[in-house]
């Protein structure tokens, strides 16, 4: 049953410090673009009751390159990404992902921090961040810390982010190699991924997958196999040992296992 809005308490933050104080002192949960929030509201699965709206905090917007690192503010939307010359130059696979996330309405409101924080193993931006060695910048009123995205998730929809922390940015170091992204869904638009993959073909190949385990997977053993010249068919077998797909409403474990191997082969042939 839909969550009753009358039972919810929402305040609007005017600055990052204002939001951080509300997280710490009033135990509020942040809302950014609200695209995942509304889904939970609609399905009645929303646990928190007290929220802070961070959408109006302009300090959390903007895409920049600092010290050769691409820095994207937490409120960077998919539309911002699609339109950004800096992202086009440094992280084109993120643009490929952004174009396939929801439709224009979702792309206008959905944010990268929301995608990361929501913690879905099917989140399309997260394999891109994992393959690009992205770092999540977390801030509380006490401190700021940087967590590699590959160490951010601890279990299904669970992460190292504390309740009093806000993601303030995602940082991506220079990516060395040819970038590749592929999403497999029921249809071309407005589909949640059955399986999603991102890769970088450089001196040391990188490959990450979504929807094949409780969290997004960075396939380190497969990467090592590829780097050492192991034939792709054998590397694909290594990949099956690194993932743990399940049967659910969108697909079967067997299908996901087979498609994961196929995506690895395509990554390798298309970036040759
Ligand atoms: C119709 C539809 C289609 C969609 N299609 C896709 C798709 O194709 N691919 C895909 O990956 N996703 C998809 N989504 C999911 C969603 O749009 C994305 O995950 C989006 O990036 C969420 O961002 P948001 O700002 O709207 O998050 P919100 O809904 O505002 O928040 C989501 C979660 O993140 C937390 N949060 C938000 N910002 C921060 C922050 N700065 N710091 C800490 N925590 C934060 C919130 O507390 C909440 O738990 C779709 C959703 C809808 C409704």
Image (cartoon, grey):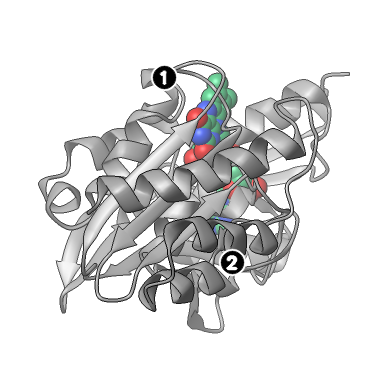
> Is 256 positioned to the left or the right of 222 in the image?
right
Residue 27, above or below 261: below
Q: Identify the residue shown where x is 79% and y is 46%.
A: 48
Label 2 packing within 10 angstroms: few (<14), some (14-19), many (20+): some
What residue is pinned by disc 1?
A: 103
Q: Quadrant of the N terminus?
A: top right
Q: Can the viewer see residue 266? A: yes
User: Residue 94 at x, y = what percent?
Assistant: 32, 46
Among the 4 quarters of the image, the one containing residue 55:
top left
Estimate the spatial distance between the alpha carbons at disc 1 and disc 2, rounded to whole Å: 34 Å
Ligand 1 neighbours mark 1 (CB distance < 8 Å): yes
Label at residue 82: none
Label 1 vs label 2, nearer the camera: 1
Residue 231, above or below 269: below
Which numbered disc, 1 or 2, marks the residue that appears first in the sequence?
Answer: 2
User: Residue 92 at x, y = what percent?
Assistant: 22, 47
252 or 28, which is in the foreground? 252
Q: Identify the residue shown where x is 41% and y is 19%.
A: 103
User: Residue 130 at x, y = what percent?
Assistant: 46, 62
Q: Quadrant of the C terminus?
A: bottom left
What residue is pinned by disc 2?
A: 21
Label 1 packing within 10 angstroms: few (<14), some (14-19), many (20+): few
242 or 59, which is in the foreground? 242
> Is 16 positioned to the left or the right of 247 in the image?
left
Q: Can the viewer see residue 53? A: no
């Amino acid at each position: 049953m839909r969550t009753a809005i009358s039972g919810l308490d929402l305040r609007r933050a005017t600055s990052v410090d204002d939001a951080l104080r509300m997280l710490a002192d009033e135990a509020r949960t942040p809302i950014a673009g609200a695209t995942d929030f509304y889904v939970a509201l609609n399905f009645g699965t929303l646990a928190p009751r007290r929220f802070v709206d961070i959408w109006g905090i302009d300090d959390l917007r903007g895409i920049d390159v600092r010290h050769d690192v691409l820095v994207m503010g937490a409120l960077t939307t998919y539309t911002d990404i699609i339109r950004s010359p800096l992202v086009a130059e440094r992280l084109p696979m993120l643009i490929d992902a952004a174009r396939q996330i929801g439709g224009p309405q979702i792309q206008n409101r959905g944010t990268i921090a929301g995608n990361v924080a929501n913690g879905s193993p099917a989140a399309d931006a997260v394999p891109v961040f994992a393959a690009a060695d992205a770092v999540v910048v977390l801030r509380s009123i006490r401190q700021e810390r940087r967590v590699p995205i590959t160490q951010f998730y601890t279990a299904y929809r669970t992460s190292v982010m504390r309740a009093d922390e806000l993601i303030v940015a995602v940082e991506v170091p220079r990516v060395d190699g040819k970038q590749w992204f592929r999403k497999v869904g029921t249809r071309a638009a407005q589909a949640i991924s059955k399986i999603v993959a991102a890769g970088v073909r450089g001196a040391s190949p990188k490959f990450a997958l979504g929807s094949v385990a409780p969290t997004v997977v960075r396939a380190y053993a497969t990467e090592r196999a590829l780097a050492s010249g192991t034939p792709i068919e054998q590397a694909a077998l290594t990949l099956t040992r690194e993932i743990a797909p399940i049967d659910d409403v969108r697909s079967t474990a067997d299908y996901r296992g087979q498609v994961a191997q196929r995506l690895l082969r395509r990554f390798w042939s298309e970036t040759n």
